[in-house]
Image (tube, grey):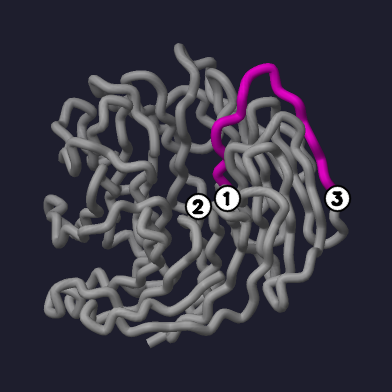
Amino acid sequence: MVTALTAPATGERLQDVSPWSKRLPWEPAFLSVGVGLIAAAGRRGRVRVMDLEGGEEHDLLTLPGGITGLTFSPDGRHLTLVGPRGFALWRATDGRLITRSTPTPCVRARWMGLGVVAIAEGGKVTTYDTDGVAQWSTAPLPTAVTDVACAQGGRLLAVSLAGQVRCFMPMRREPVAVHRYGGAPDGLALSVDGRWAVCSTYQGATLLWETHRRPTAQPVQCEEASGRHAPVFSECGHRLAVPAERHLSLWSIGTRRPTRSAVLPVCVSALAWRPGTGDVLATAGSDHAVRLWNAGAQGRRNGYTPLTAWQLTTPATSLAWAGQRTLAVAERGGRVTLLDIDPS
């Protein structure tokens, strides 16, 4: 259930209308949006694919062993599921599901372009086509992969493992660059142009660096205590949201050294940048509220007051945008809701 916040003293512009809301028989931990579809997955391996228009069930999927992530392809017509015992590829046009078992857990899937997905499994990353046929893989890595990210339409692949991040180019099994750090990286992300990379370490720090600089260059330490959610670049690549233990910091990414532009007093359980070139960020936190923020110049002038806010009955587990004016929210209580957003 989603209701409007009723505290005018907060200065928040309120919304209380949602196109639809559906309750699932499990807790939805992950959301991903395709063409006219939205997928909600629980950690135990069940996935419900619903129509964006009305929320009716389109398909019901299962990945044996559980799920640690899912993501639609850039064209929105294929869905990848990964988990401790393997991965699966689902095709929206006819509902075909291909399941592959793996000897070690699959930790992440990243689409590198139309028809090619990179899956991190054990001590390697392998790319597959939409029929589940392997196309390429990295050379064996010394330790298990903790995360993977791609940029430049799949022309750059970054792989994190204990103490380092390795950068690969397409079809080259050996890395073109290796960045070494004291802590094991996790929560890896690349800006859309591939220039900047960010990751959190198991020791709690969040590090930001330029991928084309020499590997010995000192990274920028964004936070000393990382939050529960990984850092996220905006789609245009000029903004970076870095969750910390008790707040969220916003960074401006330009031609020079990145600068922290604001600190928001929210403990984030989920966040998502609105697609496109805008600076609107959606956050959800432990106070059961979903808020929209303007991370651009207007936000700085207004002191980063939330543009809009909603109150949930339970904390949000995931957020996903379906275009410019629709935000999907998954709740710990088992509900998935679609919110209508003013695009201005």
Mark nearer the viewer, 2 or 1: 2
Residue under the image location 81 percent in, 40 percent down: 98
Residue that protrudes farthest toward the top in the picture = 142
Q: How many marks?
A: 3
Give the residue drawn at x 35%, y 72%.
292
Q: How far separated are the C-alphas under marks 2 and 3?
A: 28 Å
Position of 13 relative to 313 (above/below): below
Residue 204 is drawn in which quadrant? top left
Q: Are marks 2 and 3 in contact (CB under 8 Å)?
A: no
Can you tell which mark lies on residue 293?
none
Q: In this view of the protein, which residue sits in the foreground, 69 or 96?
A: 69
Kind of residue at badge 2: Thr
Q: Is residue 106 magenta?
A: yes
Label 2 environment density (alpha carbons within 10 Å; few <14, some 14–19, many ≥20):
many
Q: Which residue is mark 3?
A: 96
Residue marked by disc 1: 30
Indicate which disc, 2 or 1, sits on the residue closer to the N terminus.
1
In the rendered image, residue 304 lying in the magenta stretch gets the answer no
Tag 2 residue: 317
Which structural element holds mark 2?
A: strand
